[in-house]
Amino acid sequence: MAKKIPNTSSDSPLSSPPENTASATETAAVTQPAVNDKKRKAETIPRTRRSTAQHVDIEDDVEGTGESSEPKQRVIKKAKITEEVEIDADGDGKVTAKTSVKKTARGKKMKAIDEGNDVEDKPKPKAKTKTKTAKIEPPRAERTKDIKHRIGAHVSIAGGVHNSIVNMVYIGANAFALFMKNQRKWESAAMDPEHAKLFIQGCKDHSINAAECCLPHGSYLVNLAHPDPVRKKQAYDSFLDDLTRCHALGIRLYNFHPGNANATTREEGIRIIAENLNRAHADPTTGKVVTVLETMASLGNTIGGTFADLAAIINLVNDKSRVGVCLDTCHVFAAGYDLRSPEAYAETIEKFDREIGLEYLKAFHVNDSKAPLASYRDMHARIGTGYLGLQAFHNLMNDERFYGLPMVLETPIDTIDENGKKVDDKGIDAREIKLLESLVGMDNKSDDFKALSARLQDEGASERVRVGDQVQRKTIKDAKPKKKRAAKKKAEGEDDEDTEE
């Protein structure tokens, strides 16, 4: 049982057709033949109306990805209108006009519905969904066998969720995180059943136990603490969809940011989060997936910046077996919990156990910090290059209580290529996984450890100075008493007592 503590936010309208559709200038050459006693065959004389101003409205059936809820845009395309004049030479001089329309945008033939030039485009066949498998390349690093820790990184699902397995193996990981769908959109297409089968088969092929080593990350849009009924439903539906996908793939853990209380009080926000968790846990489509609350870096209206916040949520969850915590090393450090020395690390973990309970600690996000202790800045750094330093991670890697828990890197992997552009280097993930694994059993008093620690600190020195200066300037600025805004008169000649500050 956890230790309990007191409870201490446009519709895109269709673009209108252009208004400069002036009447077309017609040029027609029609020759009326003389009428003879004998009947003559009808003559067909082409008659063309050319116009640069006339348009035909054609609504293209554009195939979407299924992830966007925006209305389709109407496309206005120019067309060439050709009119054939058929003259019946049977003596009555009757003229019959036939109109045909051709698209000029891509040269496709169109069908005229009537003489009013209403045009109907032929429906386009929908493209079939193709299953794309990530290109299999030789791994940057081999997966370490018989390792006490499950260490990995966040990997891409581009092309389908099954590609996360390929990307995990590529960096030599024994754990991994992924997004279940596009994390920056509310609406997403349903998970492809074929992709799900490939994911499960990929786990079997590579001896991966997704229930133990996979830690998906929730959408950045979801705020389970929002009190507004519409926003609340939107967030919950997205959250539930992710849990359902996890259950279908055999994934047991699901990490997410608790939310913020910008639109309500902290106490009410915590209550709403727990209410949403209880509702999701009761839904059979979520199976036994454990909802994992992530520790946050900032305070203010953000929920989860203290161990007390997380404990308060857990206390309100009915099924305690369905809730846990992911400790982000960068976040807790930025929030004021020190991990740098063996003593500081021990104190922080003891505080976690006292306020929440170690039985709820289900996973780690392993990141160094570009910002100093208690800066409340969420700025990840590569291992050993930030303010935490290598010793903090030596402390964690040698804590036997956490052997077997998924530990996921979220450190920067961008680098500058020969053209001066930022590109992702997956080799950084592979190297950092091996770095963390090498700390297990390493003597932190040895010359090798000290040299490695010093080299990594030198690598991140300039960035630490830059961010540290920013934090210090902001701290000084915030400490100064704020000046009251000068009173402004509503209108010339008004009394001072009518002005607002």
Image (tube, rainbow, N blue to C red):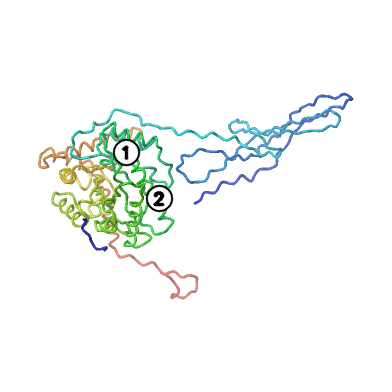
Quarter of the image for the N terminus: give it: bottom left
Residue in view at x 81 percent, y 24 percent: 41
Residue 158 in sight here: no
Residue in view at x 49 percent, y 74 percent: 493
The residue wearing badge 1 is: 155
Q: Looking at the image, tell me whether mark 2 or mark 1 is earlier in sequence order.
A: 1
Q: CA distance from mark 2 to mark 1?
A: 24 Å
* Residue 443 quadrant: top left
Residue 134 in sight here: yes
Query: SS at mark 1?
Result: loop
In this rendering, the answer to whether 387 lies above or below 451 is below
The residue wearing badge 2 is: 237
| Disc number lying in front (2 or 1) | 2
Q: Residue 248: image x %, image y %?
A: 35, 41
Q: Nearer the viewer, residue 315 or 152?
A: 315
Number of marks present in the image shown: 2
Residue in view at x 23 percent, y 33 percent: 143
Q: Residue 99: image x %, image y %?
A: 71, 34
Q: Residue 127: image x %, image y %?
A: 49, 33
Query: SS at mark 2?
Result: helix
* Amino acid type assigned to the residue bearing label 1 in the image: Val
Q: Residues within 10 Å of mark 1 (few under 14, many from 20)?
A: many
In this rendering, the answer to whether 491 lies above or below 59 is below
* Amino acid type assigned to the residue bearing label 2 in the image: Asp
Quarter of the image for the C terminus: give it: bottom left
- Left or right side of 160 for 53: right
